[in-house]
Amino acid sequence: MTAAAVLTTALAQRRERPGADLAGSAPDLVAAAAAMARRFRAGGVLHAFGHDDADAHHIAVEFVHPVIVGKRALPAIAHGADRAAFRLRHAAPGDLALAVCDAPPPARRNGEPLRGTPTGASCSFGETALNRPAEGAVSPKLQDEKRPVAAALAAAGERGLLTVALAGRFWAGPPVDHLLSLPADDPLVLRELQVSAYHLLWELTHALLEHGPDGSTP
């Protein structure tokens, strides 16, 4: 086997397990999409943001300009990470917030995660009130500056928005309504899974708006 073939095989294997884990989260993806569909049906607006502003714009365009013929345009706004928290503090309580989050690896000592450090096993899609940050460690203003996406999610939750987060395996953010903790260690694979996840949420939300248990949307 050539060196190129060995490399290609190794790359494919590195992506195979995370992809299977994403497929296994289908029931939780549907649960999040159903909650999003209910908010859209009631007139809610989607607020998209993330560590990479390109994700926010990508998500907003997907919802506002559907690529599938016959799908309705859904209201969505893209926010830059540095302004998202401020804007979400003034959003309508019936809106939705979808965040694409980077998650740093846990602090380690001698190769092992430190006690109390979040791990992939501590996070699962659909759980709430996960891994609350320690109080009093950092001032709120400084915390907002260092962790703008987490601050925006916290602001959205406090305002009453439906919060959905697509995160890495080491989630240490505020409580959210629906958390998809993707298990990929490779940041490039994680990016692929996050993009796949928000496309799936878009398609499932449309399917549930049209054929969901709450009935079709006019």
Image (spheres, helix red, strand yellow):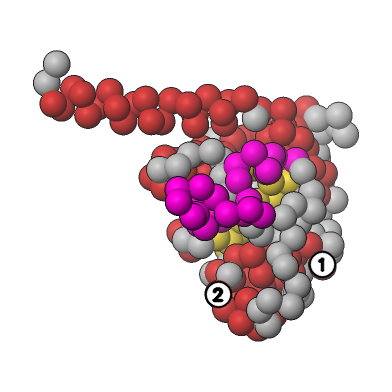
Q: Residue furthest front?
A: 110
Q: Secondary structure at mark 2?
A: helix
Could you say which is closer to the camera, residue 154 or residue 203? 154
Q: Which mark is residue 146?
A: 2
Using the rendered image of the protein, determine whether residue 167 is visible from the camera's viewpoint: no
Which residue is the extreme one toward the left?
2
Indicate the position of residue 72 as horizontal and vertical percent values: 66, 42
- Left or right of 119? Residue 33 is right
Magenta stretch, main secondary structure, is: loop
Disc 2 packing (10 Å; few <14; some 14–19; many ≥20): few
The image shows residue 204 at horizontal and vertical percentages of: 67, 33
Question: Mark 1 is on which residue type?
Answer: Glu
User: Relative to 13, does residue 97 appear above or below in the rendering?
Assistant: below
Q: Is residue 114 magenta?
A: yes
Which residue shows up at 48% across the image and 39% down it? 184
CB atoms of marks 1 and 2 within 8 Å: no
Q: Is residue 184 visible?
A: yes
Relative depth, front residue between 112 and 186: 112
**x and y percentages locating residue 161 in the rendered image:** 79, 59
In magenta, the rendered stretch is 100-126
Q: Earlier in the sequence, mark 1 or mark 2?
A: 2
SS category of the residue bearing label 1: helix
Near mark 1 (Cα within 10 A), the count class, few <14, some 14-19 or many ≥20, is few
| Residue type, label 2 | Lys
Q: Is 93 placed left or right of 23 in the picture?
A: right
- The image quadrant of residue 29 is top right
> Which quadrant holds the C terminus?
top right
Q: Which residue is mark 1?
A: 158
What residue lies at 86% left-to-right and 29% top-to-bottom?
213
In the displayed image of the protein, which residue is found farthest to the right? 214
Does residue 153 appear left or right of residue 66 in this picture?
A: right
Which x, y percent locates residue 11?
31, 31
